[in-house]
Image (spheres, grey):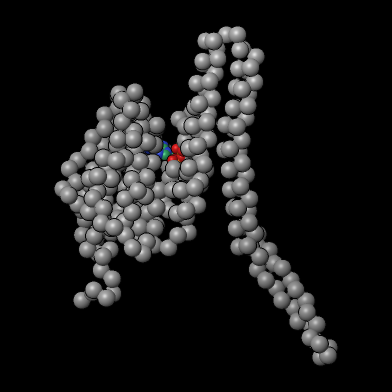
Amino acid sequence: DSTSFAVRVAPLGGTGLVLVLAEDQTERLRVEAVRRDFVANISHELKTPVGALSLLAETISDASDDPEAVRRFTGRMQQEAGRLTHVIQDLITLSRIQGAEPMADPDEVEVGSVIEEALDTVRTAADAKRIELASGDSGGLTVMGDEGLLATALRNLVSNAVAYSPKQTRISVTVEETESAVEISVADQGIGIPPQDLERIFERFYRVDAARSRETGGTGLGLAIVKHIMTHHRGEVTVWSKEGSGSTFTLRLPRTEDADRSPAHAG
Ligand code: ADP
């Protein structure tokens, strides 16, 4: 990596001396590059469905005397519009959550209901691939947090599990309580993630296989959202994966008693 300096020269009035300031610009340039990449990625993600929509509209107007073709193309338009909504929704969620301070006033959230909420949203997609969704008993466990955000995090994990698994496999969601944390794991028997990509999949827009990810309707933002939601909850997300045999993502949240113990109550 190269280092870059900005040099400022200022004469010190009347003294005949000159002040030279060298400022390390490396970090500022890196941040700028990340932001430029982010904007370029967003533009691309928005342009793709908009381009498809305008092409489809044109095709429909050419095929207006063929009702069957009109029906097919309007269906495709609905799909592309749905995709656009998905990208925009993910961007809104991400901008709301990234860089946020750890939650100040969390609610007590039942883990079992978060799991049910997340599984309900992927049931249709799982049924279509005859994927079995199994969830263990969460024993009435609770964590401190925001139920909507926790459900979003878990939904992103199970919908990835469905998207990246072949037909007739099994996805299981399990809950475990350790000394200091509640762990919710989503294990699939899917395609897995190559070791060299494991560290990067939580970055915004990073995909192992861009073409396949678009096919499955992914935005490349799902895991970045999960990571930021976990940070906001003083928790973390980890992954274990083996190419060709499956992946397990684990959400680790501080236990209710620990999260609840502010200095005023301690002791
Ligand atoms: P996407 O919208 O592309 O799914 P994500 O941020 O949710 O974006 O995931 C990033 C990438 O990580 C995906 O493109 C995919 O390559 C990989 N990935 C995520 N979850 C899984 C999984 N359960 N099995 C295999 N690969 C996965």
Residue for point 39% across, 62% down: 102
The residue furthest left is 139
Taking the spot 23% from the left edge, 34% from the top edge, the residue there is 134
Q: Is residue 265 visible?
A: yes
Q: Residue lying farthest top?
A: 65
Q: Is 189 positioned to the left or the right of 77 in the image?
A: left
Q: Residue at x 35, y 48 (%)?
A: 148
Q: Position of residue 194 (x, y in %)?
A: 43, 39
Task: Pick the residue in front: 176 or 83.
Answer: 83
- Residue drawn at the location 66% of the way across and 65% of the way down: 25
Q: Is residue 11 above or below residue 150?
A: below
Residue furthest toward the bottom?
Answer: 15
Q: Nearer the viewer, residue 217 or 61?
A: 61
Q: Quadrant of residue 191?
A: top left
Instruction: Identify whether 194 is placed above or below 17.
Output: above
- Residue 176 % position (x, y): 21, 49
Residue 206 can be seen, yes or no: no
Residue 257 spot, x, y in % from top left: 22, 63
Ligand 1 shown in quarter: top left
The x, y position of residue 162, in whole percent, is: 36, 32
70 vs 226: above or below: above
Q: Nearer the viewer, residue 72 or 205?
A: 72
Identify the image quadrant of residue 169.
Answer: top left
Q: Is residue 141 above or below residue 102?
A: above
Quarter of the image that includes the N terminus = bottom right
The total of numbered circles placed on residues is 0
Position of the C terminus, as image quadrant, is bottom left
Please indicate whether residue 111 sits to the left or right of residue 30 in the image.
left
